[in-house]
Image (spheres, rainbow, N blue to C red):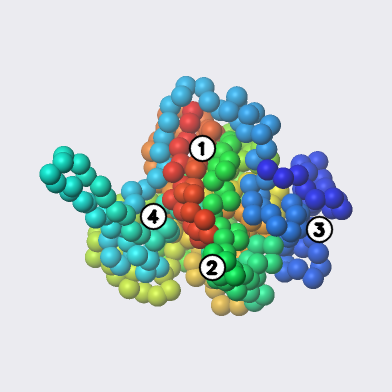
Amino acid sequence: MAPPAPGFKLNENGIPDFDDLPLRKTDPHHAAWGLYGDNDELGTLNRLTDERVAAAAKSEIKTGHRVSLNWPLDVQPEPSFFQRQVFHQQLIRKDPRVINDDVWTFNSQVSTQWDGLRHFAYQREQKFYNGVTQDDIHCVGADGKKSTVNGIHAWTDQGIVGRGILIDYHSWRAAQPPSTLQPYDSFEALSIPLSDLQACLAAQGTAVRFGDILFIRSGFMASHARKPSSFISAHKAVVPHHFGGVERSPAMLRWVWENFSAVAGDQPSFESWPAPPGTPYALHEVLLAGWGCPIGELFDLERLAGHCRDQRRWSFFVSSEPCNVPGGVASPPNVLAIF
């Protein structure tokens, strides 16, 4: 992890204030380009310092109980959400020896995933994190090697490891008087208000610490499991797909910037999708292209939520090791919550 580059005014957490973004006035809105150097590929993961990870391990690992947050790779049939290639396994029997091999092919975002820094650019400016362009990503050098700039491999050296917190919005919402809530449906382009997320944290008694890895159980997985296949197929046929997610607002951006190293949810799009007409920006472009903040989607948080309820504790240690694919756009997270 790199310290901030000299020349920036930093607050008590070692980052610039949200109101000072963009750091360079010629950069896109809210961009933090150059904060960790012009060639940085870790973004907000630089907040996961050795000291912060060690402190998280000490405070969060008590029983050794482990919970996987990975949806099966083969869970989506054709066609998948967002028309991505589904998982296929070719099982190879190697007679006459009693041996098997297999070959996997799949889109890296067809199941639980971390969106990497090659996935989503500032759409108007057409630039990825730290000003990288599509041509930079797709170029081939004089030596014939493909560019790997902003690839997912940069996150594999130290992983995405630290203190995680779960906001079990789905359970919290079910316990509230319906008249006090805004409408929400995992299969509609409706937003989860930041105020609801903060109310859920308060009800859980969960404190946020700077550098935490955020997980939001929106209820998508629970809803998906109850839907008949005919509903899922009909939903996939409507393009763009409609999904619930967190609100798209300056307040949400401020909250993420001021607190987290990475964010994730159980829904196909962390933010509500699609954006309403006239929306000035997507969270994806600011988080990924502006800050280098990993976005996790389709995380299976059902067993995690159950264990958190049983333990009355919604914080834990997170260990995630993305696949070491040079130049990769996204990756299965290979993630465990450890209590």
Q: Decide which of 184, 33 is in the foreground and name it.
A: 33
Q: Which of marks 2 and 3 is in front?
A: 2
How many C-alpha atoms fall within 10 Å of the one at disc 2: few (<14), some, or many (≥20)?
few
- Disc 1 versus disc 2: distance between alpha carbons? 35 Å
Query: What's the amino acid at mark 1?
Result: Ser
Dot label at residue 20 = 3
Q: Which of marks 1 and 2 is in front?
A: 2
Report helix, strand or loop for mark 2: loop
How many C-alpha atoms fall within 10 Å of the one at disc 4: few (<14), some, or many (≥20)?
many
Q: Residue visible at 40% across and 68% down?
A: 82
Q: Residue visible at 60% across and 24% down?
A: 58
Report helix, strand or loop for mark 4: loop
Report helix, strand or loop for mark 1: strand
Q: Which of marks 3 and 1 is in front?
A: 1
Q: Which of marks 1 and 2 is nearer the N terminus?
A: 2
Q: Earlier in the sequence, mark 3 or mark 1?
A: 3
Q: Earlier in the sequence, mark 2 or mark 3?
A: 3
- Disc 3 versus disc 1: distance between alpha carbons? 32 Å
- Residue designated by label 4: 111
Tell me, yes or no, whether the two marked residues, 2 and 3, touch with CB atoms within 8 Å. no
Query: What's the amino acid at mark 4?
Result: Ser
- Residue designated by label 2: 144
Please indicate whether residue 135 sits to the left or right of residue 188 in the image. right
Dot label at residue 319 = 1
